[in-house]
Image (cartoon, coloured by chain):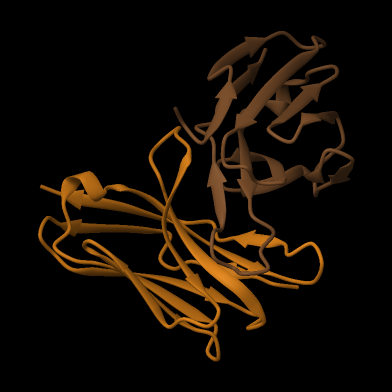
Chain colours: A orange, B brown
Amino acid sequence: KQEVTQIPAALSVPEGENLVLNCSFTDSAIYNLQWFRQDPGKGLTSLLLIQSSQREQTSGRLNASLDKSSGRSTLYIAASQPGDSATYLCAVRHGGGYQKVTFGTGTKLQVIP
Amino acid sequence: DADVTQTPRNRITKTGKRIMLECSQTKGHDRMYWYRQDPGLGLRLIYYSFDVKDINKGEISDGYSVSRQAQAKFSLSLESAIPNQTALYFCATSDTGRTGREGYTFGSGTRLTVV
């Protein structure tokens, strides 16, 4: 059974700091890994998707890496801003015919001005 | 317009009432999903559909039913709402996953309160 863990559950940093969010998964046989952002009471916004054959993806100040062999992905946020405050979830697509997605429980990020 | 649209955005209903949540998408995806999100429990899958004639139960389907009216429309019904169905509900779509390129697209959610 695939298990996805995100540590820490919450993180508070001063504005301008570079930070790393972690996502670990137990089964390396994945199709892709997707990072989402969720604002309180809102939907999930896709940030980056890394296919199983890729090592990293970049979008603006965000960089996501994937190491399947160690079952880890990191989301790097450069020069954090108060507007980055949100919960960040990773989701791993895996499995057979259904290609199930397992979500982590998220890291709640607060960027302090 | 959003790729995945959910209606209503917020709803308060009474115990025992039937309620329908609607979802429509313009992504052209065959696969659609209904999730609920509760604090501390994360996202849990209620039902999923791979096409109009293929509907499957997820982890927590009891008390819910769905209808796939068309490729672009997937509705969730609570036949007789109860207070522990109070949650944030999300509709999502995805590609088939063969290429692994697209991933999931979520709607903005419906906040449902059962009193």
Q: Please tell me which residue is depicted at 82% across the width and 67% down the height of the picture.
A: A97
In depth, the one of B25 and A85 nearer the eye is B25
Q: Is residue A53 above or below residue A91?
A: below
Question: Where's the N terminus of chain A, which quadrant?
Answer: bottom right
Relative to residue B102, is residue B67 drawn left or right?
right
Q: Is residue A24 above or below residue A91?
A: below
**Residue A41's image quarter?**
top left
- Tell how many labels: 0
Q: Please tell me which residue is depicted at 85% across the width and 29% down the height of the picture.
A: B65
**Residue B74's image quarter?**
top right
Q: Please tell me which residue is depicted at 54% across the width and 65% down the height of the picture.
A: B101
Relative to residue B67, is residue A78 drawn left or right?
left
Residue A7 appears at what percent x and percent y?
A: 44, 68
Relative to residue B77, is residue B90 drawn left or right?
left
Residue A33 appears at what percent x and percent y?
A: 53, 68
Extreme residue toward the bottom, this view: A69
Relative to residue A31, is residue B18 drawn left or right?
right
